[in-house]
Amino acid sequence: MPRAGLTTESVLDAAGKIADRDGLAAVTLARLAKDLGVKPPSLYKHVDGLDAVNRGLALRGLKAASARLQQATIGKARDDALFAFAHAYWQFAKDSPGLYAASLRAARPGENDLATAGEALVGVVLAVLAGYGVTGDDALHATRGLRAIVHGFVSLDAMGAFRLKLDLAESFDRLLMAFADDLRRRGTGDEVEAA
């Protein structure tokens, strides 16, 4: 019999708390069982092993990130949308570092819900890029570039690698502005506006 009150959702809730507090690698079935007050085999009544837990966290992370990024960019265009997107993504990674890390997992064959959630997040990026007139393969390359910029900055910030006494948000904004300048050139052929 499953333990009263224990569900797949409550297992994932506990896994998310561990991941956010101690890192995604700290999520193990033994740790989950201990935190939930059950024996590890009891978890199999609710999840099909650690991979299922990680997949569930990835899905939660992608959905949470997409919702936050859609909310941040709604009604905005071009630089306003780009900066809102990037800052909201950075804040999501600060607020939910475990879910953020989980969301980086690529969907495997047959993981259609995970693939759909990933496509929704990419859809937010593509909508931001469309405001610059960047579409097609250029938009996919730009999506990779924006992901690398945000993830690189987020990762370095999370590791405490930025130790100079300079405003991190200003550094981030300067990086984003360089990216936006390139988008303006690619999307419309316009000259970059003088700062």
Image: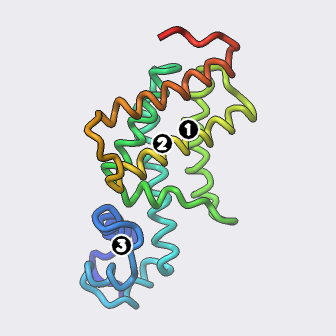
Gap between marks 2 and 3 measured at Cα: 30 Å
- Residues under numbered marks 1 and 3 in contact, where contact means CB atoms less than 8 Å apart: no
Label 1 neighbour load within 10 Å: few <14, some 14-19, many 20+: some
Q: Is residue 140 left or right of residue 99?
A: right
Provide the secondary structure element on which disc 1 rests: helix
Label 2 neighbour load within 10 Å: few <14, some 14-19, many 20+: some
Q: Earlier in the sequence, mark 2 or mark 3?
A: 3
Residue indicated by mark 3: 11
Q: Residue at x 45, y 26 (%)?
A: 74
Provide the secondary structure element on which disc 2 rests: helix
| Spot occupied by residue 135 in the image (x, y as percentages of width and height) | 70, 28
Residue found at the far front of this picture = 164
| Spot occupied by residue 82 in the image (x, y as percentages of width and height) | 49, 28
In the rendered structure, which amino acid carries the disc numbered 2?
A: Val
Q: Is residue 177 left or right of residue 144?
A: left
Q: Earlier in the sequence, mark 1 or mark 3?
A: 3
- Residues under numbered marks 2 and 1 in contact, where contact means CB atoms less than 8 Å apart: yes
Residue indicated by mark 1: 146
